Amino acid sequence: MEKTQDAISLRYYWPGMEEDIRKWVLECPPCQAKRNVLKIKKAYVPIEVTEPLELVGMDLVGKLTPTKNGHQYICVMIDYFTKWTEAYPLKTKCAAEVTDCIMDFFYKFGAPKRLLTDQGREFVNTLNYNVCEKLGIKRSLCSPYHPQTNGLVEKMNGTIQRTLTKLVGEKPNTWDGHLQATLFALRTKKQLTTRYSPFFLMFGREARYPTEVPEEYLVTNDGVEALIAQETQPVGMKSLPAHYRRAQANMGKVREKIKRKREEIGHDDHFKVGQKVMRANIRQEQRKGGKMETSMLGPFTIVKLEGKSADLVTPKSKVIHKVNIDQLSPYIEPTPRIPHKWITESAMSLSPSSQVASTSAPAPSVPVLSPSSQVASTSAPAPSVPVPSPSSPVASPSSPAPSSPALSPSSPAASPSPPSATVCVPSDILETVVHNIWAGKKPEVLWSKAGPYKLFTRNLQEHLRPDALVESEIINAYLTIALSNFSEAGRGRGYLLDSFQMTDIWRGKNKGLRKIDPLDYDVLIGAVCEHHHWTLTVMYPKKRQSLYVDPFGASEEALKKCSAVTRAFMRQRGHNCSRWSSQTVPHARQVDATSCGVIVCKLADMILNEEDMEDVFDKTSILRMRLQIGKRLIKETDDLTNLCRACGSYDTDVQWIACTPCDQWFHRSCVGQPPVEAPFYCPLCI
């Protein structure tokens, strides 16, 4: 999922894209049908490498569906450091064809120091040993019946098979025609352990996509001759050793994270009658030649549960009796996406009004943290909150309770809503809430909204907790709040260049950006994400200058590039900036590998407020800043009154229900269709 997000965000942008991509991937039916579920073991002994081609893993995939060219196997080779993958279609798995693959790899990249394989006869034979000895390649073998030793290749085998299954569709005998396209996709996407793409670590640059080739690209003999005569090393190759060290540090962090996870016991799925599930394709697992088929069948609906046995019904009403629930996995049903533009226009077309007054009930376990108006409670017993039927007029959280025609006749009359009052949440309570979110003690709900950016529990838990890399949604939301305070304080007019827009500007791509006049603003600010490292760019159009801040310290080369790209941005919008300058500000340096996003948010605050820079960014101060960011995002959120706190969307075509203690509103479908006759307690109040 992160690879898909990274590949799309490098080239496109729309509001709420991270949530849309996550939803699209999770709900993809072909992906769910080919889902790969691994059993987690506690023992974990990783293989550590320090440079490219230090260790290359090799394995065979097959027997696959025979193609028209007679190919039935795939020979996969992968470099353990860069994760660069080579794959060769084979007609047989004899020693001669496998040796040809080793020679092809050698002609492209040179000889690896060590080659790791299993003990199959296609690898353990005199021919292979003689070739490796001539090339100076040392051989290592996996233990019998223990493929985890060569786990990286085994994992890649499954990835290649699942990708090919999606591409071939109903023509499984054409998989060899899609093999190179599959490899290109794997090589050019960010690898989750190194945080770099294999293409970048191998060649010192990212792959150029067809959409990135200039329309007019003139190549002359004189230009080529002049370039060859320089005989200088490209800039990307010079910086590769530093990127290797960073990739090695990233791999170390991932190894520690996996080790901690392996020590934990996996969780059980809790199925219920009526739930849609996928069922493991046992025939495919036990039959040779069936690896290109889907590994999960369905969806099915559970009609009966008894212990670990379940009865399923197919879409054609055929009942399958006594299926072990270990073979089942939950099915995520695709739902239509509501475009952000429609949501915004619908919200603006409705006039705000007061909420239904709540009555006293058991105090919620977590206080309401939204700074929007909160309805006071009375001392009367808590009445149930009725929900309109589908045929009744549209009801939303903004509908006034006393005059609403959506209330059923049998419902008790709701008391009038008292004047709203702003709730001031103490800072220590907010700090406790943030800590509980990090610890996984809070349910999945919407906590904050700043402009188009919505932050749920998983955003704050996975991307703001200690030692986590801060994601773009959090940085953009925080900068939106900081710019809003900047304008409200009368310091000037500010404009946020979204991190995706600012990164495109940094790369010299200004197409698709909103047509704005920079001179209408006193400051334009945006974060740049390049090679998974955050930096900050601030433009002052009226002063004809820009600031560039790198948590590791801005180099002269980066300052020159900042001056060039910001000047080009101004010129493209019709402003002559011949005297444009770029500089940085003194600040403490980043000392770890994950706090760059936190430091960028803090430095942006200090620059906008003209405050003194931090003296040190140690572990304690970084943790304090993470807490400050979390508390501020929750406290200074936009009004969440008209949004469902479970899904964060505004939809008038569904039924709503309000929590009896805290008066927060939810779609009934998002909270399991609770009965309208009884008091409802939201996930925050349970």
Image: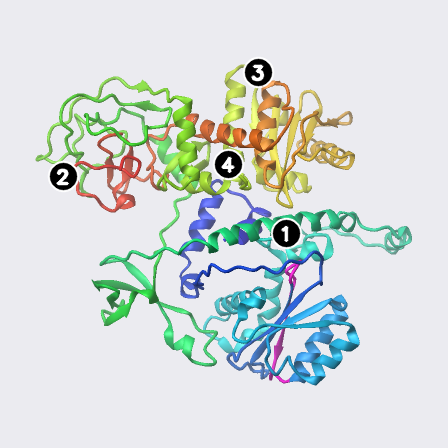
Pointer 1 with pointer 4, Cβ within 8 A:
no
Question: Pointer 4: residues within 10 angstroms few (<14), some, or many (20+)?
Answer: many
Q: Which residue is mark 3?
A: 491
Q: Earlier in the sequence, mark 2 or mark 1?
A: 1
Q: Position of residue 619 (x, y in %)?
A: 58, 33
Q: How many marks?
A: 4
Q: Position of residue 371 (x, y in %)?
A: 38, 24
In percent of the image, x 63 and y 54: which residue is there? 197
Residue that badge 4 annotates: 474
Numbered badge on residue 196: 1
Of the numbered discs 1 and 4, the one sitting upstream in the chain is 1
**Near-viewer residue (398 or 640):** 640
First in sequence, mark 3 or 1: give its number.
1
Report the side of 472 relative to 519 (left or right).
left
**Could you tell me the amino acid type at mark 1?**
Tyr
Q: CA distance from mark 2 to mark 4?
A: 39 Å
Q: Residues within 10 Å of mark 3 (few under 14, many from 20)?
A: some
Highlighted range, magenta? 80-94
- Which residue is disc 2 drawn over? 677
Q: Mark 2 to mark 3: distance in Å?
A: 52 Å
CA–CA distance in space, label 2 to label 1: 54 Å
Q: Nearer the viewer, residue 200 or 257?
A: 257
Q: Name the image quarter holding the C terminus.
A: top left
Mark in front: 3 vs 4: 4
Q: Nearer the viewer, mark 2 or mark 1?
A: 1
Residue 463 belongs to the span the image colors magenta: no
Tag 1, which secondary structure? loop
